[in-house]
Image (cartoon, helix red, strand yellow):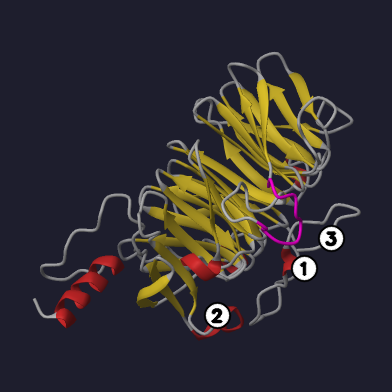
Amino acid sequence: MPRTLARSLLVLSLLGLPGEGRAAAPAGQPVIHPYWESYTRADGLPDDKVMAVAVDGPRVWIGTDHGAAVLEDGAFRVFHRQDGLAHDAVLSVAVDPVSGDVWFGTGGGLSRYSAGRWTTFTQLTSGLPNDVIFGVAVENQNVWVATTAGTGRYRVRDHGWDVYTPANSPQHEPWGYFVDYADGLVWAALWGGGVLEFDVAKQTWKSYLDPDGEMEIDLFRDDGIVHVITTGVSYREGLLWASTYFGLSRYDGHQWRSFAETDTGIASDFINFVKARGKVVYICADKGLSALDGASPVDRTVTYTPIHGPLEGHRGWEARIYERGQLVGRQPLAAGLAHNFVWAVDFQGDDLWVATSRGLSRGSLRPLPPRPARIAGPERPGPPPAPATRHAPSPGEAARPTPPGQGGR
């Protein structure tokens, strides 16, 4: 086979494009989602700054800077503080797969939406460690929260609380960014405290830190977590993924591995959130969204990013394919994400739902059907629309608040 033809078939396979005779993509490989659409306030969102998204079957729950919403059957239903939400700034959302209850971590407490009724937990009314909740996760009959003053576990059956701080767990800092649960283990991402593992059966904690102890640089590559300021954590199929503002780390139970923008093609080292699906991890960064195959010997990565850089998203988007950090293919997209600053991602079948600083985006493997016209209805006044902008928020502006006494990025 001529070399040029072989290379063309390879690129077609990587791109996931239809074509006669193209080889099937390896199982688990991140494929390109070529079709995208976005939702903003004009479509019914309470605010364009979307910070959390959680899929619940046919429903998509959304947390924004000015209220929560659920998208179902093409229409949004919006919730504000006057409806029962603890606070209008919704930072995290989790759905109980058994009961169907939806839990919202907000800037003013924890809220549960169950069978149409709201219940709110605050520092003053419950054992919640702090009212600012960056992460929430459901573990069996328990709900975990990552707050600015410790990690909390609410025992739903007996309405009790367990609070974990540096006084009773191996936390170096109590400021929590995220919590995750899978396979009997709860994981907590902490500002300045690395990653904590809680074994539900044994009721024991284990800490993972950067062994070199350096805050400014990763002194020794792959010796542990890349940095102790961790922003997200996801554990699936025996792989632990931890995101930081300095790159991505993976732990397989035996060995650590670090991933950076310069050697893998991920959108950026400034990572807000990470979520794995099988062996593939999705990376939400300040310059776009990436998917990396954790089982690939060549670190196959697909990155969605503005063609001309993060300042030029209005000029078009593309999907880039990397192997061993080398660009091996690219595909222009008819439409891209709502914005390059990505806060969160979740999965609905083959589709991706992505929270960005300028709206909610959906990526699909197949052409998306036309959306029904929005049905006008009564609305509560919300914040004025954000002015049009062609630049990404700086890390200091868009990132989570910095704890007192800590530096920036």
Q: Nearer the viewer, residue 270 or 261?
A: 261
Q: Quadrant of the N terminus?
A: bottom left
Which residue corresponds to the image point at 80% horizontal and 35% vertical from the top-left?
150
Q: Which mark is residue 397?
A: 1
Position of 300 compared to 216: left or right? left
Which residue corresponds to the image point at 16% horizontal and 62% vertical from the top-left?
23
Q: Can see residue 217?
A: yes
Q: In 3D space, how far apart are the residues under numbered discs 1 and 2 (Cα atoms)?
A: 18 Å
Percent of width and height locating residue 117: 66, 31
Sequence-wise first label, 3 or 1: 1
What secondary structure is the stretch in magenta mostly built from?
loop
Part of the protein shown in magenta: 210-219
Give the residue pinned by disc 3.
Answer: 407
Sequence-wise first label, 1 or 2: 2
Q: Is residue 255 above or below residue 289?
A: above
Mark 2 secondary-structure assignment: helix
216 is within the stretch colored magenta = yes
* Label 1: how many Cα within 10 Å (few below 14, some 14–19, many 20+): few
Q: Nearer the viewer, residue 393 or 298?
A: 298
